[in-house]
Image (cartoon, helix red, strand yellow):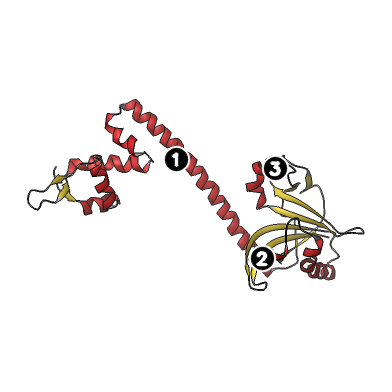
């Protein structure tokens, strides 16, 4: 079978840019033949096998040297190179899956903000499995920082003579690092949940009670009027986004107020 195909037709067939096909030809990786009638370079049917090979191995991430050596490799060498490609692809899949998880989590945060805005001061079970203290050393923070920083929790105690503020991270129940500050199921406390917004420009870590007070006090008064004065606020960070009210970036938190 020897049906000639133009560069444009092969480009469409394999979804490969014409410039890439021409580059492969210059490098001797694929073969084209001159049409005696119009002098155009064309592919005959058997030439397409080379394009098929290049398409597969190029998309596997083989470099120019590996592509050039393809037809000097025996079965075992091709298998070894394919195995290495497979490992690279598996690593990429895991990275993409992790990124997708982070995207889904961020979208869940957006949904949560809308839910809390529509149903303020709703009675709720604690929505965090466990809260642990922030790492004290840099090495631990480097190790755990990426997954933990998006699960930041500010714990504000409203009992006693003076309000106190402690920091932690919301973690799965099987997470073993750090001092456990609170764990779901260890208390029969009841909670009211609400949305807390605070302008990012006014909050510099480590946060101060004085900086947070103007934004939490109206909620504390409302909860005291509807239920009773809360003993503690667990401010769980959701995300940062522009807010029309504050005319700038704002920290959005779901807050569990312990009654």
Q: Position of residue 65 (x, y in %)?
A: 33, 35
Q: Residue at the location (18% across, 50% down)?
A: 5
Q: Residue at the location (34% across, 42% down)?
A: 58
Q: Position of residue 108 (x, y in %)?
A: 61, 58
**What residue would you read off at disc 1?**
89
**What residue would you read off at disc 2?**
250
Please name whichever residue, 58 or 202, is drawn nearer the observer in this view of the structure: 202
Disc 1 to disc 2, C-alpha distance: 38 Å
Asked whether the beta carbons under mark 1 and mark 3 sit within 8 Å of each other, the answer is no
Foreground label between 1 and 2: 2
**What residue would you read off at disc 3?**
138
The local crowd at label 2, few if under 14, some if 14 to 19, many if 20 or more residues have their Cα within 10 Å, is many
Q: Position of residue 122 (x, y in %)?
A: 74, 65
Please name whichever residue, 56 or 36, is drawn nearer the observer in this view of the structure: 36
The local crowd at label 3, few if under 14, some if 14 to 19, many if 20 or more residues have their Cα within 10 Å, is few
Disc 3 to disc 2, C-alpha distance: 27 Å
Secondary structure of the residue carrying tag 3 is helix
Q: Which mark is residue 132?
A: none
Is 190 situated above or below 81? below
Q: Position of residue 93 (x, y in %)?
A: 48, 43
Residue 45 falls in which quadrant of the image? Answer: top left
Q: Residue at the location (55% across, 47% down)?
A: 98
Foreground label between 3 and 2: 3
Q: Is residue 199 visible?
A: no
Q: Residue at the location (72% across, 68% down)?
A: 120
Q: Earlier in the sequence, mark 1 or mark 3?
A: 1
Please indicate whether residue 92 sits to the left or right of residue 233 in the image: left
- Furthest-right residue in view? 161
Please indicate whether residue 161 sits to the left or right of residue 14 in the image: right
């Amino acid at each position: 079978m020897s049906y000639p195909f133009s560069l444009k037709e092969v480009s469409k067939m394999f979804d490969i840019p014409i410039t890439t096909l021409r580059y492969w030809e210059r490098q001797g990786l694929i073969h084209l033949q001159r049409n005696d009638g119009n002098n155009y370079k064309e592919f005959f049917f058997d030439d397409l096998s080379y394009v098929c090979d290049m398409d597969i191995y190029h998309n596997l991430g083989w470099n120019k040297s590996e592509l050039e050596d393809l037809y000097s490799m025996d079965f075992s060498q091709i298998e070894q190179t394919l195995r290495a490609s497979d490992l690279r692809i598996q690593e990429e899949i895991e990275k993409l899956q992790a990124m997708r998880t982070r995207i889904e989590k961020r979208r869940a945060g957006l949904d949560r903000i809308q839910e809390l805005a529509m149903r303020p001061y709703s009675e709720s079970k604690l929505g965090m499995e466990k809260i642990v203290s922030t790492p004290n050393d840099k090495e631990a923070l480097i190790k755990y920082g990426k997954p933990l920083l998006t699960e930041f929790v500010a714990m504000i105690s409203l009992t006693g003579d003076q309000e106190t503020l402690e920091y932690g991270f919301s973690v799965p129940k099987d997470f073993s690092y750090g001092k456990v500050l609170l764990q779901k199921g260890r208390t029969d406390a009841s909670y009211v949940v609400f949305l807390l917004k605070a302008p990012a420009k006014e909050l510099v870590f480590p946060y101060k009670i004085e900086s947070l007070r103007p934004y939490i006090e109206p909620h504390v008064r409302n909860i005291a009027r509807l239920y009773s004065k809360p003993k503690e606020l667990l401010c769980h960070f959701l995300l940062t986004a522009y807010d029309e009210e504050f005319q700038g970036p704002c920290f959005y938190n779901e807050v569990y107020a312990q009654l």
